[in-house]
Image (cartoon, coloured by chain):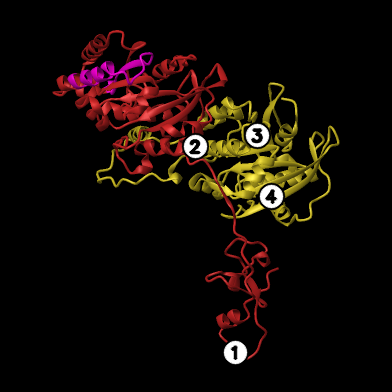
Chain colours: A red, B yellow
């Protein structure tokens, strides 16, 4: 039992002297290294002075050695080796103007795994969990936001990638690594306006899948003509340049289909994608069309509509490995 | 010597489990798979927790930042093999620190590398899923509420904002990463504690995990080759304190307070044997 009369604690504020309890949680308190013997009774002295004058020579404190764990930060092109790929990672690049919903597509795929929404695919691992969490944060009450949102992707010197390792439900031990290029809409605007800007997007050389995201909300108001023009111009840059591999798959995506449906603009959205698809001919290995409501504001249709079908196309196709001599 | 790692965030029931395990192995039921076989040199910590458990008092939570090492000397009843369990009983806050700081002590690295099995604790009393703003708005609307009129003050993301299942998934990723690709598989037992609260719902522990922590469940399914896993529902207390303490104290054999629900040979099985999760961890067959 702790002896309040013969011992005292050197730590300021420790309740040991009054209650016998150790503020660091040692139980019994005698195990606490800060507990020392009180000085013997003698001429009245300030207790603190007494403690200080009888303070034992401090023992050298053993420094704890820490091991660094994976940072969880976004990946850069040179970091791909860090993920110890289960397979040749498939790169998915989402392109489009600012606020088209590119990052929201990525974060809603992540949240769909978190909430167990996918029927055919499962989450196996991610090297960038904190990066995903940060991008999802404006859809969490803790953020203080009133409405779900996604933080605007800022232009960066180097492209950043988020990583997911997934598997099909039917074959959970067979993993596939997906890398999502999280590139700002402003960077793609520069490409649209200047062909030379495409040369700074080195990551496009490795793309297995390129998504051109058309902001569905912009098809529902006065912006619809310029939105179609901008999408066509960006696509033309991609198609006429050789940076994107010829065997990459092109995905034409209309986002925010909840807004499109609410404005009865579905035929217009479908027509827009047909125009874009016709413009690229056979430049790409395949051209797919998707209509996505990743995070409907009113909860209708269900969050993540269209995402699992999109995911399935990425899982179903990867660019063939280069053969020797090519 | 067998070394087990216990992983679990604050409030997940690690220490209560250890206390009940210590009592059970010293007062084994007829079908107990593991029994006590002597005692380690330093048993003060586990003895105190065990006495609290026996008296139906809340088992003292491991203080934040504190790291206790519990060593139990046991014997497998089926084979007679001696088993020494070394279980670091870290506070849940320390595991959360690993997620936040992306570091852990060198000794933790050594423990993880040398571990023969992993006990991952979750609790029916905790929430593991993230709450989204869409979900919150639906909840508010369902009770007839309306959004607030104040201008929102936006916070920046910090690791402590992440939901518990993400933190647990990352901890398991850390463990796999530090053990390395060439390490032998590490059996992983998920203990869903406070199972008494879920008992009677019709869900098995595995179904509960799939519903309440789907990301964790999926990660375990997909990594079964390196982390073969099984889920057990465990109520180490047998009921809530203090409301049920009197009833529980009146049970003649304290081990009979314990509820363990798992799967045996493909069938749901329930008994009082809290050593079952450990027995599975130590077993070599599937």
Identify the residue at horizontal 13%, vertical 23% (top origin).
A222
Per the image, the residue denoted by label 1 is A44
* Cα–Cα span, label 4 and label 1: 46 Å
**A310 over A30 or under it: above or below:** above
Which residue is the site of mark 3? B189
User: Which residue does the numbered mark 4 point to in the structure image?
Assistant: B53
Q: Give the quarter of the image for residue A295.
A: top left
- Mark toward the viewer: 4 or 2: 2
Q: Nearest to the eye among marks 2 and 1: give it.
A: 2
Which stretch appears magenta?
A229-258
What's the distance in space between the residues labelled 2 and 3, CA to CA? 18 Å
Q: Which residue is mark 2?
A: B166
Identify the secondary structure beneath mark 4. Answer: helix
Give the mark, 2 or 3, whose residue is nearer the N terminus. Answer: 2
Q: Secondary structure at mark 2?
A: helix
Q: Compute the Cα span from label 1 to label 3.
A: 61 Å
């Amino acid at each position: 039992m702790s002896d309040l009369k013969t011992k005292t604690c050197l730590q300021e504020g420790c309740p040991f002297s009054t209650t016998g309890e150790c503020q660091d949680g040692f139980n019994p308190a005698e195990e606490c290294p800060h507990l020392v013997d009180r000085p013997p009774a003698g001429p009245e002295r300030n207790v603190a002075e007494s403690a200080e004058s009888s303070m034992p020579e401090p023992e050298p404190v053993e420094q704890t050695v820490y091991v660094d764990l994976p940072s969880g930060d976004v990946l850069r092109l040179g970091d791909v080796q860090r993920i110890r790929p289960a397979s040749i990672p498939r790169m998915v690049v989402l392109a489009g103007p600012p606020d088209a919903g590119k990052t929201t597509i990525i974060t809603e795929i992540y949240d769909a795994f978190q909430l167990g929404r996918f029927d055919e695919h499962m989450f196996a691992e991610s090297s960038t969990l904190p990066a995903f969490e940060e991008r999802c944060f404006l859809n969490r009450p803790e953020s203080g936001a009133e409405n779900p949102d996604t933080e605007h992707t800022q232009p960066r010197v180097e492209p950043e990638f988020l990583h997911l390792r997934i598997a099909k439900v039917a074959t959970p031990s067979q993993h596939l690594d997906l890398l999502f290029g999280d590139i700002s809409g402003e960077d793609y605007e520069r490409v649209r306006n200047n062909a030379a800007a495409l040369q700074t997007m080195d990551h496009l050389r490795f793309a297995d899948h390129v998504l051109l995201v058309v902001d569905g909300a912009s098809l529902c108001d006065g912006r619809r003509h310029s939105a179609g023009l901008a999408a066509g111009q960006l696509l033309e840059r991609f198609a006429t340049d050789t940076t994107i591999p010829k065997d990459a798959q092109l995905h034409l995506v209309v986002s925010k289909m909840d807004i499109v449906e609410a404005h009865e603009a579905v035929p217009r959205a479908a027509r827009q994608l047909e125009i874009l698809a016709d413009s690229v001919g056979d430049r790409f290995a395949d051209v797919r069309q998707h209509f996505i409501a990743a995070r409907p504001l009113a909860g209708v249709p269900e969050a993540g509509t269209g995402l699992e079908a999109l995911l399935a196309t990425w899982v179903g196709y990867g660019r063939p490995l280069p053969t020797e001599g090519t | 010597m067998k070394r087990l790692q216990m992983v679990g965030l604050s409030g997940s029931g690690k220490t209560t489990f250890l206390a009940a395990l210590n009592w059970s192995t010293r007062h084994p039921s007829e079908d107990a798979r593991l029994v006590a076989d002597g005692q380690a040199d330093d048993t003060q910590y586990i003895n105190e927790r065990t006495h609290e458990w026996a008296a139906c008092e809340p088992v003292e939570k491991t203080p934040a930042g504190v790291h206790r090492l519990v060593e139990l000397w046991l014997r497998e009843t089926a084979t007679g093999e001696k088993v020494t369990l070394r279980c670091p009983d870290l506070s849940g806050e320390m595991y959360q620190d690993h997620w936040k700081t992306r570091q852990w002590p060198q000794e933790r690295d050594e423990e993880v590398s040398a571990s023969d099995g992993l006990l991952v604790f979750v609790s029916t009393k905790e929430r593991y899923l993230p709450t989204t703003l869409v979900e919150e708005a639906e909840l508010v609307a369902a009770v007839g509420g309306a959004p607030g009129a104040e201008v929102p003050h936006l916070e920046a993301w910090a690791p402590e904002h992440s939901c518990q299942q993400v933190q647990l998934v990352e901890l398991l990723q850390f463990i796999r990463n530090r053990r390395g690709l060439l390490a032998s598989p590490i059996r992983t037992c998920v203990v869903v504690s406070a199972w008494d609260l879920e008992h009677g719902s019709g869900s098995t522990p595995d179904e509960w995990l799939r519903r309440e922590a789907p990301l964790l469940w999926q990660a375990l399914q997909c990594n079964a080759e390196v982390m073969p896993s099984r889920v057990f529902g465990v109520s180490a207390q047998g009921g809530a304190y203090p409301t049920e303490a009197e009833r529980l104290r009146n049970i003649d054999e304290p081990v009979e307070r314990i509820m363990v629900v798992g799967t045996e040979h493909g069938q749901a099985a329930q008994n009082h044997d809290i050593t079952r999760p450990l027995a599975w961890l130590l077993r070599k067959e599937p």
